[in-house]
Image (cartoon, grey):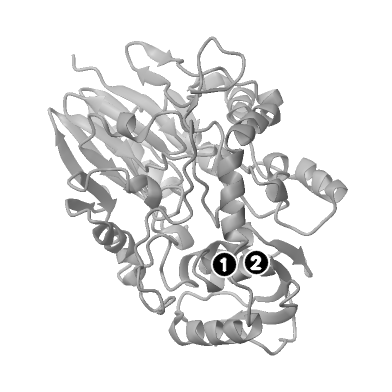
Amino acid sequence: MDKLTITYVSHACIKINGKFGGLLTDPWILNEPVYAFTTWKFPAAIMTPEEVAKDIDTIFISHPHEDHLHIPSLNQFPRHLRILLPEYVDYPGLRAQMVERTLRELGFYNIKKIKPFQTLELGAGTRLTLIPAAKTKYWDWENSGFVLEHHGQKILNMNDCPSDSDVYREVNERFGEIDLGFIQYSGVSMFPGCFRMSVEEMRKASANKKHGWGQQRNMIDLLRIKRIAPFAGDFAWLDDRLYHCNWSNRATPKLFEDFVKQNYPEKNIDVVIMYPTDTWTLEDGLTRNHTEINWDNYLALIDEVRDKLRPKVTQLREWLDGAPVQNMLERTRSYLSHINQFVTKEHVNFNVNVRVEIEGEHSNFTFYMCSSHEKGFYFDWNKPKQIDQTLYIREALWAGVLDARVLLTNIQWAAQQEEHVPFRIEIARFWFWFENYVDLNNRNIQALVDRALHPQLKERIRPMLGVFPIEKETIKQHANAETCTTE
């Protein structure tokens, strides 16, 4: 029998090899941060780009979030590789074409789109079927997953793909028992780590924060699944300004394993926790090549990674803080006026107003991000009747937006928020919309494909923008080691 070998690379990137060839998913393979350069990985990536690319002929990209469509990582791969993308048949428009446009600008040309539940023959009897996002999760329709069928084995990769009973009912009817399912065990939210509050208030809010495990419950309740591999939640914050997010904003795979054992003992589901370089086969099970992590003491291990990457963290911080701060008010007025001309007014099903305060020696001014069913989304300098939240942005960070070093789309991950009204679902809808549309469909600062954003730029495809390589950067973990070491 042709053995199927799955190697965990990092985050949502897994490498699947068999007689059919090699398939790589969502390659965020470099130890580089995402979301306004705030969010890193822990455990850190170990495999070099050359090791990851070896024996790979196909890359699957599930959706355009930066930790799945990571431009500096994609830049490491040969352009002839086949790229598989979901086809958004129900959502025509510029946003639906952004991933393909970005890849073609980068030089990839062998691109294949797959429709919902369409099956693609990979070769040697191995088939890939695309799983679409749930239609009830209208804000996240770009997401996708797949089922890989390989000589009787069935591997489900749902990464961040939102599910509901309709999606999983069809998966269950089509594929039956699943041998191994990959699913994100923890996303990140702005609360409480990105809110302006004291440490004591933040610790209390973090302690009271509940993990819903809604997507994970759907997988367990609605599918016949034998093993689950929790992944794609391996976030860390290495800059001192956001270090508190390591304990305030994240969960761990151990918490997920405890959740399964406590709530589904009768199902006998094996939770397969994989670390970078670990492998799994149906015949041999999990092979642990990485140091076992003590999740009760993970902050100490994050400190070790931070110490090893400190030169990179320092260089990145200096670059981000080095954007020009002259004439901030005038530049901001021009920038917001320009965006107002182009930003879409569609899909605004909320009435939310956010005050934005730019804080710094050369700034200290305020504008407003307003939205309504009638007017859509727009920037304004006049205070609306009701303010739902305030977003506090450091002057240097806002200068980075104006200088095209940081996307406005991701600014909330590096700024601070304050609530003025009780939370309501409309506020969540505002931020979902904001992340998808405010930068005119552009999703990566390294690849500004929609030219209406920052039209002054001549070089718009900058795959290594914000990347600062350091000597002895590859972080190696050894199975017999007690701590991380660097080679």
Whether residue 213 is visible to the viewer of this picture, yes or no, is: no
Question: How far across and how far down the image is residue 170, in percent?
Answer: 33, 43
Q: Is residue 52 above or below residue 338?
A: above
* Depicted 37 relative to depicted 416: above or below: above
Picture residue at 57% right of the left edge, 49% below the top: 315
Residue 338 located left or right of residue 361: left
Judge by depth and name the residue closer to the eye, 208 or 463: 463
Q: Position of residue 320 (x, y in %)?
A: 58, 59
Furthest toward the left, the residue is: 124
Q: Is residue 52 left or right of residue 138?
A: left
Q: Which mark is residue 396?
A: 2
Point 61% across, 47% down: residue = 314
**Badge 1 density bin: few <14, some 14–19, many ≥20, Cα 10 Å:** many
Residue 59 in picture, x, y percent from top left: 27, 42
Residue bearing the label numbered 1: 400
Where is the N terminus found, in terms of image quarters? top left
Query: Please, is residue 288 above or below residue 228 in the view?
Result: above
Image quadrant where residue 88 sits: bottom left
Residue at the bottom extreme of this rendering: 382
Residue type, label 2: Ala
Q: Secondary structure at mark 2?
A: helix
The answer to whether marks 2 and 1 mark residues whose Cβ atoms lie closer than 8 Å is yes
Res. 78 image quadrant: top left
Above or below, 31 relative to 342:
above
SS of the residue at dot 1?
helix
